[in-house]
Amino acid sequence: MRDTSRKLFVAGAIAAALGVAIGAFGAHGLKPVLMATGRLETFETAVKYHFYHALGILLLAVWAKTSEQSTIIRAGWVLFAGMCIFSGSLYLLCLLQINWLGAITPIGGVLMIAGWMYAAWTAICS
């Protein structure tokens, strides 16, 4: 259990670092482009959800380390997948201007909801 919680923690920490880096890049390097295309708000939403869920993944990893419940780890990886799909599709939409990528975004949102519900279910049942 400890090895899997460590891997989840590493994934969350890297995701948090990337959230800061991508947010800074958007705010400083991409802002004129994002404003010109009308995608600044979309990019900011992607960064916000990215960072919130990276912190959530870290929280679940810490919880998993102190618990014997493997479902916490699974909830964390579901959150991770949702974060990657949700924010990743929005990042690509903003940078590449490929509008159909917006159709993928809700899949990530559903996975993030499922991850949080899975974590709640684990807490209720433990």
Image: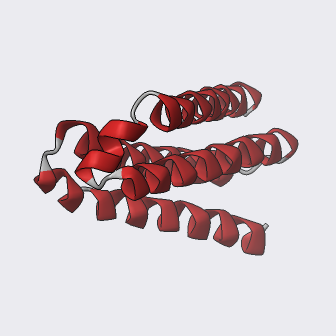
Extreme residue in the right direction: 66
Q: How many marks?
A: 0
Quarter of the rendering occupied by the N terminus:
top right
- State left or right for residue 1 relative to residue 74: right
Residue 100 is situated, as x and y percent measured from the top left of the image, at 12, 55
Q: Nearer the viewer, residue 95 or 72?
A: 95
Q: Quadrant of residue 54?
A: top right
Q: Residue at x 14, y 54 (%)?
A: 99
Q: Is residue 17 left or right of residue 111?
A: right
Q: Position of residue 68 (x, y in %)?
A: 79, 46
In front of the other: 23 or 114: 23
> Is residue 39 shown above or below 21?
below
Residue at 76% across, 29% down = 2
User: Foreground: 112 or 96?
Assistant: 96
Determine which quarter of the picture holds residue 57: top right
Q: Position of residue 58 (x, y in %)?
A: 72, 41
Decide: is 25 above or below 99: above
Q: Position of residue 111 (x, y in %)?
A: 42, 60
Determine the residue positioned at 56% across, 52% down.
Answer: 48
Q: Is residue 89 visible?
A: no
What colour scheme was applied to this rendering of the protein? secondary structure
Of the pair 33 and 19, the residue shown nearer to us: 33
